[in-house]
Amino acid sequence: MKKKNILSLIFLLTILCGFNSCEDKPLGPIEEEPEDILCNGTGWFRQYRDYDGFDCDQKFVFYFDGGGKETVVRYLDDFMGSTEKFTYTFQWSWDEEYPYSIFIDYSDGTYSYFGDMYISPYELSGVLNDYDVTFEPF
């Protein structure tokens, strides 16, 4: 009976240690500069469904010089594999009045606002043009 209890305790401790070793997003402040994380060298990715019901992939790449590129791939038909791909270049700058918010000015004269940003090595989230969005690094 004692041996069974000891084995059960060892098994329980093994499981608890295993759960504890999973890497999770930090809850505290990030030590790195937000710009260093935003301009991570690769970019940010999310999937969403657009207003016409099509699945889309959206990628943002931010550069340290204030430039950037957005790519949207729209999947038109599940059977034929038809897609539309849009690529936009832009200039971005920090909003001096609201921390962790940026202006995005596209080369075609349109603009976007990305506010209330949460920037970490694991995710980029916030409000992009009045929509709550979450991007992952790619």
Image: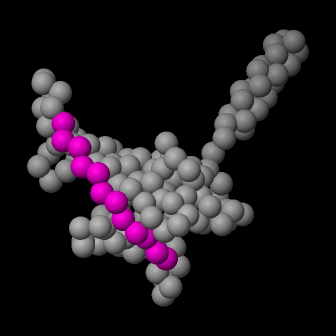
Q: Is residue 2 left or right of residue 16?
A: right
Q: Position of residue 128 (x, y in %)?
A: 34, 66
Q: Is residue 122 visible?
A: yes
- Does the magenta segment cover residue 100? no
Q: Furthest-right residue in view?
A: 2
- Prevailing secondary structure of the magenta residues: strand
Residue 76: x and y in percent read 14, 37
Which of 105 and 79 lies nearest the eye of the viewer?
105
Query: Does residue 120 appear left or right of residue 76 in this picture?
Result: right
Residue 15, x across and y down, in percent: 71, 27
Q: Along the line of sight, which residue is nearer the eye, 28 or 37? A: 37
Nearest the camera: 107 or 7?
A: 107
The answer to whether residue 56 shows anywhere in this view is: no
- Span colored in magenta: 83-94
Q: Is residue 6 above or below residue 101?
A: above
**Quarter of image, res 53:** top left
Q: How is the image coloured?
A: one colour
- Residue in view at x 40 percent, y 69 percent: 91
The residue lying at 29 percent from left, 67 percent from top is: 107
Residue drawn at x 24%, y 71% is: 110
Residue 60, picture quadrant = bottom left
Q: Is residue 12 above or below residue 74?
A: above
